[in-house]
Every structure is written in structure tokens, then in C-alpha cells.
Amino acid sequence: MALPGTPVRRWASAGQTTHCAGIGRGNAMAAPIDRTTNRSAGTWARWLGVVAAAMLATAMVAAACSSGDDDADDGDAPAETIALASSQDEEAAFDADMGDATAPEEMMDAAEMLEMADDGMAEGPASNDSGRSALAAGVPAVPADVGRDIIYTAWVAVEAADVAAASAQANSIIEGLGGFIFSQDTRTQNRARTVLTFKVRPEQFATALDRLSNVGELVEQTVNAEDVTGIVVDIASRIATAEVSVDRLREFLSQATEVEGVAELERELSNRETDLERLRGQLRSLRDQVDLATITLSITESVEAVPDASVILRAWMAYDDDPCLGFGDLAAPLDGDVGFCFEVENDGETTLTEVMLGSNALRFNIDDMMVSDGMSLERIEPGERAVATLTEPISDGRIAGRVATRGLEIDIRLSAVPVTADGAELARLARGATLHLYVEEEDAPLGFGDALSGGWNALVSLATGIGLVVVALLVWLPIIAVALWLAWRLLRRRRTRQPSRAALIPTTEQQADDD
């Protein structure tokens, strides 16, 4: 890029090539074409020096190609490099010579400086040596057995009877492995629970997982490994490029003199420094995650499984028969005995004790009941049952002092205490059943009231029948009247059209006259 106010230099290339034959046919750098009209003698002297330097560089390139003719491919790059270096040296010499005559106001403006900074960002990563050195400085160390940047995370859920003791054991395990606790969240309502987050070295990750899984009963475990090598390399490369750009902008800012240019450079430098710090923060975060694996441990208070406790109550009643073959509804006479049968079955997983039976309607006592042989209401094991019977007399339509002639609902109540295998008592169980008893009354002679009631009922029935007949006639009466009227008219017409039989039969005298 030329400085403002300097003459424009144009160079004519004469078939420059990397092969020795091409170099022999043409010059690597032709003489400059000077389009300016007013030059001093000193300026022409400088140009002669430049031309001499170009010719010397061409001779050196030709000598290098002739010495390296056995390997043309290996000689290409040095020739180009030397030619480029020669041109850069010439330009630098020209700029140095012209620098004394250049005024301060002829320096590059801010836009050109920013453009050169951007060019530097594009050219920065192109150098293999600088890129390797930047990556080597920015990429964090990784485990030797993997050779990659891996972020290890794990979730472990266990249950323990004592959450506090299990938490202390987990902390001791992590401290023994050189790790530390990162966070803790504890809850004591309902079932106690604590969530611990640990940080350990990646090489201790598997050992920590194995030991933490044994602080209680393992419920769930999830392990995740994320390879972020590509992300780390990309961020490190962007950091190296951003550092080159920031350094170049700082250099330009130190050389800028115009107020507007300084302001623009400072603003752009601030933006690029912000981007650089953001990239560095991302790289630090990734390094921290790679260097320390994360294990989250959830410890929940374990609840002992309570055995299932259940009981079934069945009830029947019968009159002068085995009550266990009876029914839930029974009709019995005014006097006699009614038998009741109660069956208690343990269909749970615990032993039933203190089995009690009762009824508000019968008011009986459990001591009045008879339990079948080999059975007991004091203790019923799982899968077993007990059968008890009871007999209650009916006198004048009453049972246990209650009138049953209009129907009596008999409630049966059961209560029992479940006991686990280790003798722990559980909540008392309660069940219920319902029976219905009807006592039939005997037929008695009819009294005056009964006779009066019967006669009245008969009259009501007769009046009801007559009323139904009248209603039926009223509905069909118009139709019957019309039918009778039509029949009478038809009969009358027939009589008027036919002469009487007496008029048609001749008398004896008429027959004689005819003769």
C-alpha cells in the first residue's frame, strides 16, 4: 500500500516463472516505469540503486536454480520466497528513502489502518509456526490415555436409611480422591433428600462413581462423555487471530495523529478486545470442565416396604338350618331361632390379631360366639380363615329386643390389628357387612274395622270398574250412533222400493174374472 502523497510506482513483470528456463528468458523484475515529470537527481539515483538490487536478486535466483536443478519441486518455493523478499526489500528501501520527505499529514488514514489490521487477521493463522505455537499455548492438557478434550459428567441416585450419614460418607470418598464438593441442596420434608455435586480429576472419575454408588442402594446412574476437542482448537485459533489483530490496531493507534482516526481506531480496538476476552472466557470454561469431571449424587431416604394387610368379612343367616349355608336376606316366623355365620379371611401378608366382631342391632358379645374347631379369632395367619356362629331367638317378632316385623337391618363390624414378621403393629383394619331380617306375622280373625275396610275397598273397586266402562262407552258412543242411523236409513229405502207381497198375489175373484 502506497503512502498518501507519494508517486505511484508501477512495475512491469516480464514472464516471471519458477523454472530455471523461464528465469533465463525473462527478468524477475523489470525496470520501473516512472510517470512523474519532476524528479530530482537524488531520486533517480535511488531508482538506479533499486534496479541494481533487482538485478542482483535475479542473479542470485538463477544461481540457486542452477544449483538445485536435480530437484525442481524443492526449488520452486525458495525462488518465490527470494523474489518476494527482494520486492519487499525494494519497497522498504523506497519507503525509507521517501519517509524523510513525507509530511505528517501524508500518513495513512484510519480506514487504511483498519484494512491493514484486517489483512493481518487473515494472514495471521496462515503461518504454520505461529498457529502451532498459539494452539500449543491455548489448548489445555488432556488425559494421556485419551488424547482428547473430554468433558465427563455423571448422575447417580441412591436410597439410604440415614441421609446425613450417607452424605458424610460421600464427602469423605471425594476428599480421599482429591476432589471437592461444588454444591449441596438438602430437603427434610416428607422423605429426606440431599443432592450433592462433586468435582474430581478425570482419572479419578470411574473410581469416584464406583464408590459413590455404594453409599446406599443404587436406583439410577447416568454417565456422559462429551468430546470438545474441535471446539477447543477452534476457539484457540480464533484467540490467536484476535490477538494479532489487537496488537496491530494498538500499533496503528500509537502512530495515528488525526482526532477522527484516533477515535475510530479506539472504538474498533475496544470491540476487538471485548471479542478477545469473550473467547478467552469460553476457553477457560471449557478448560475447567475438561480438567474436572462433574458427578451429581442424589441421596433419598429409603422407606421400608410395608407388607400388605387385608381382611375379608362374610356374613349369612338362616332359620332352623346351618347358618353358613344361609343368605344375606331372611324371612323368619314370629317365634324361633335365627342362626348367624361370620367368616373372617386373612388375604394379606401380615398376621391378624385382636380380631373383634360386633353389631349395633344384635348387641352380641364375641364370647357368645362359637368358633369352628382348629380356628381362632385371636390370631389368623396369612391365607387362613376363621368361622364363627351365633344363634339369636325371635320372640313376638322381636330379636335382641328390636322389632323385626317391619324389617330389620343388621350391621356386622370387624376390626383387627395386623402384625409384621418382626412384631411391629400396623394400623388397625376395619370391615363391615349388612344383613336384612324380616319377621312374618300370623293371620288373625277379621274385626269390624277390617270388615269395614274390606267393604269399602270392594265398593271402590266396583266404582272404578263402572267408571272404566262408562269412559269406554263415551269414547265409542258417537261411532255407534252413526252406525245405527246409517243402518236404519238403508233398511227404510229397501222397504219403499219393494211392493208388498199382498199386492202382487191375485185374489180368487180376479182369477175367475180372468178365466
Image (spheres, helix red, strand yellow):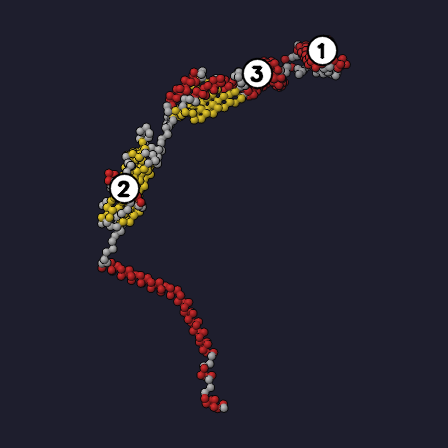
Residue 122 rendering spot, x and y as whole percentages: 62, 19
Identify the image quadrant of the N terminus: top right
Mark 3 and mark 2: span between their CA atoms? 94 Å
Q: Indicate whether 502 appears above or below 462.
A: below
Residue 389: mark in rendering: 2
Any part of residue 331 in sight: yes
Q: Which residue is mark 1?
A: 68
Near-viewer residue (418 or 69):
418
Q: Please tell me in which quadrant of the rendered image residue 215 appears.
A: top left
Residue 302 rendering spot, x and y as whole percentages: 38, 26
The kind of residue tagged 3 is: Leu
Q: Dot 2: what SS?
A: strand
The kind of residue tagged 2 is: Thr
State left or right for residue 260 relative to residue 311: right
Among the two numbered marks 3 and 2 on one chain, the one whose residue lies closer to the N terminus: 3
Q: Nearer the viewer, mark 1 or mark 2?
A: 2
Q: Nearer the viewer, mark 3 or mark 2?
A: 2
Q: Are marks 1 and 2 in contact (CB under 8 Å)?
A: no
Q: Residue at x 28, y 46 (%)?
A: 321
Residue 251: mark in rendering: none
Near-viewer residue (198 or 90):
198
Q: Residue at x 47, y 17 (%)?
A: 204
Among the two numbered marks 1 and 2 on one chain, the one whose residue lies closer to the N terminus: 1
State left or right for residue 98 relative to residue 303: right
Report the residue that reaches farthest toward the right.
25
Q: Residue at x 39, y 67 (%)?
A: 477
